[in-house]
Image: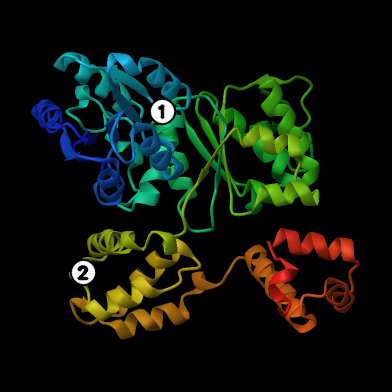
Amino acid sequence: MNNECARVLLVDDDEGLLRLLSMRLAAAGYEVKAVGSGEQALATLPQFQPHLVITDLRMDGIDGMALFDAVHKDHPALPIIILTAHGTIPDAVEATRRGVFGYLTKPFDSQELLDYVDRALRLGGLGRDSGKRAEDGDWRAGIISRSAIMEEALRQARLVADSETNVLIQSESGTGKELLARALHRASRRAAGPFVPVNCSAIPETLLESELFGHSKGSFTGATQSRKGLFESADGGTLFMDEVGDMPLAFQAKLLRVLQEGEIRPVGANRSVPVNVRVVSATHRDLEEAVEAGSFRADLYYRLNVVRLDLPPLRERRDDIPLLVRHFLTEINERNGRRIEGFAPDAMETLMAASWPGNVRQLQNVVEQAAALSTTEIVPASLVQRALRSDPSGVLPLAEARDRFERDYLEELLQITGGNVSSAARLAGRNRTEFYKLLKRHHLEPEMFRAS
């Protein structure tokens, strides 16, 4: 998508003005879709996936502000420009307070329009200086998508990339959290600096402080020389802390101090070292629940979660599966010298219908396994089914498996007791207060299990 022209959706019930605006924007090289009502605009949005919406304020039916409200409910990062006559300027000013990018007062000249459009598109990395293409088009390299829900996540990421704000990426395992973190780094002012990833769950608790902050020679057994930590290595760039939700509680206070003061103290050192690092963190856990349960510090959560980005699981962006399959096949053919042309129609149907608990990572494993075993240029459905049955990435992470078991267990107790919380709590060996907390955590309502 980053090689396409910027797409502009025009909405106006004045056919003459709509035609004139379309001609001006098309002549400037933008891809334009013109519709005559707010209703048509909402119907067009999922297929056209515009980078910018320009709408008249006063229209019959769904007017400009109602359209803005409807669009921003699902696409909060999509810039919208309001067109207004002189008599509606107060309305337009109020619109900007509510989040509209801006407004143009009729009549306006072509250059004013193009300048305004360019400023709006620059929010998403698009602008005239780049030939209507992303001026840093490589920022999202490796992220394969055309689905509206994924494009909205990327649009929000591009908006926050230029700031120094800490970002928390929350999504299931295998959705591409590190890819998005790298994209944020490439689109930021720190792009020339280092990008340093670390998986917090893969480092033993006893080594975590030394790994992140470094250590002095002789500070512990085996420390034969001083060593810089990952914070120092990321100085001037971005530190990506994956699975931050698995960080030991005792270490969280030390990380909070570093984020507050902008300096680290290596293990065994007598002085602190200033660091200039932007932190992008990620987790598959619900940190709000972890805060409520007392396993994650609330102050650290708010420090990391200044802006939260949610990556959709693969089952919510199934229209990306054929694109991803084609991408993985291209890589496999280049790496192994194969000539696998694609998947049979029923094989692709099987891929599209799978539940994908391991998300994109699992899809890649299944494609590689099926392609490796295929003796023909078209992969049959039988190999896909075999790969899905044997693929180890289909096994849920322990935390997710535990959560699913706990929810299923609670549902079964409520079904047995007909929604009677006291009886269900006794069967579970918990008091009512604890049991209610468990139900709240899993969003279970006892009333759902009571007979009418």
Whole-percent x and y of residue 120?
A: 32, 25
Q: Is there any visible trace of residue 295 in the rendered image?
A: no
Relative depth, front residue between 405 and 387: 405
Q: Earlier in the sequence, mark 2 or mark 1?
A: 1
Q: What amino acid does circle 2 point to?
A: Arg
- Per the image, the residue denoted by label 2 is 338
Place residue 31 in its image quadrant.
top left
Q: Residues within 10 Å of mark 1 (few under 14, many from 20)?
A: some
Give above or below for 337 relative to 196: below
Decide if residue 195 is on the left or right side of residue 142: right
Residue 139: which disc? none
Query: Where is 105 relative to 223, above or below?
Result: above
Residue 35: image location, x then y, percent:
19, 41
* Residue found farthest to the bottom: 382
Say which residue label 1 marks. Answer: 191
Q: Quadrant of residue 111?
A: top left
Marker count (numbered): 2
Give the foreground label among 2 and 1.
1
